[in-house]
Image: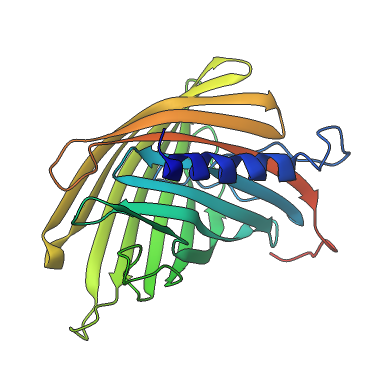
Amino acid sequence: MNRIAQNTFLAAGGLVLASSCVSLDSPGLAPAHPQRPTIANDTYTTPNGMMEVEAGGNVQFRKDVSAPVLLKYGMGERTEFFAGGDAIKSVEQADGHMTTGLGDAVIGFRHRLRDKDEFEPGFAVQFATKLPTASENNNLGSGRMDFHIAVIGEQDYKGNTFVGYYDLGLLSEQIDPELDLDHTFAAMGTTPIRKDLDGYGEVAFEWIPEQSVESLTAAGGFYYAVHPSFVLDLGLRVGITDDAPDYQILFGLTRALGKLGLRRDVR
């Protein structure tokens, strides 16, 4: 295993140890709800006043390695604030060597518009901003700020959960003052295998007309609940079109951390 991959695993492992400082038996912990490692998010929002952390690794050996981290906080009964980014990112350069550094950061929020029920789906909207914290000179980021708005629909059917997701990204350009449009469509489903194990599958398509990018990927994997408040994930994403990565090994965790500060009655 190369040194970059080792650093990624060490970073993800450090986050596992840090999150273990909160006992799984602590009173008031909400069940963990992973939004990773899929491209689509569902309509769930972290409970009011609660915090949750996601961390993991996305690995394509000798080409692209990253360790995404995300903190989520329930701002109200229906609204979640999130902030994170790639704690470590490594990409292959034109001459074949790998460059490693901090990745871009992201902040945003998701708001549930309607809860799903037996007969009708739930809906949510999500707003996010990418902050250019990665080095543009080392090809770790674009060096510019991007903006995203997503609409999400979710419904249960015969014990399975299905999600439809569309994200519109406004990508800043260094030379052209006009924004490039980034369209991402994703369909995801999860199914219970046993009490502590779920499977997931996803198909996602990203289209950036101004950059002639058409990236189609398929992903699948598993969620394993060590405890209701601590969930591990393991999966594989494969590229179908030329613009998509050949493959990515996906692994990580989602950990409920409990309350932060005073609970606010925001709706």
Q: Is residue 212 above or below residue 137?
A: above
Q: Position of residue 12 (x, y in %)?
A: 58, 42
- Dividing the image into 4 quarters, which one contains the C terminus? bottom right
Q: Is residue 209 above or below residue 158?
A: below
- Dividing the image into 4 quarters, which one contains the N terminus? top left
Q: Is residue 52 something that shows in the picture?
A: yes
Identify the residue at image location x=15%, y=56%. Answer: 213
Q: Position of residue 122 (x, y in %)?
A: 50, 45
Residue 91 horizontal side relative to residue 19, left or right: left
Nearest the viewer among 168 and 238 is 238
Identify the residue at image location x=81%, y=43%. Answer: 21
Q: Is residue 47 something that shows in the picture?
A: no
Identify the residue at image location x=25%, y=58%. Answer: 183
Identify the residue at image location x=38%, y=75%. Answer: 145
Nearest the viewer among 233 and 264 is 233
Residue 200 horizontal side relative to residue 34, left or right: left
Residue 66 horizontal side relative to residue 171, left or right: right
Q: Position of residue 126 (x, y in %)?
A: 47, 60
Residue 265 horizontal side relative to residue 156, left or right: right
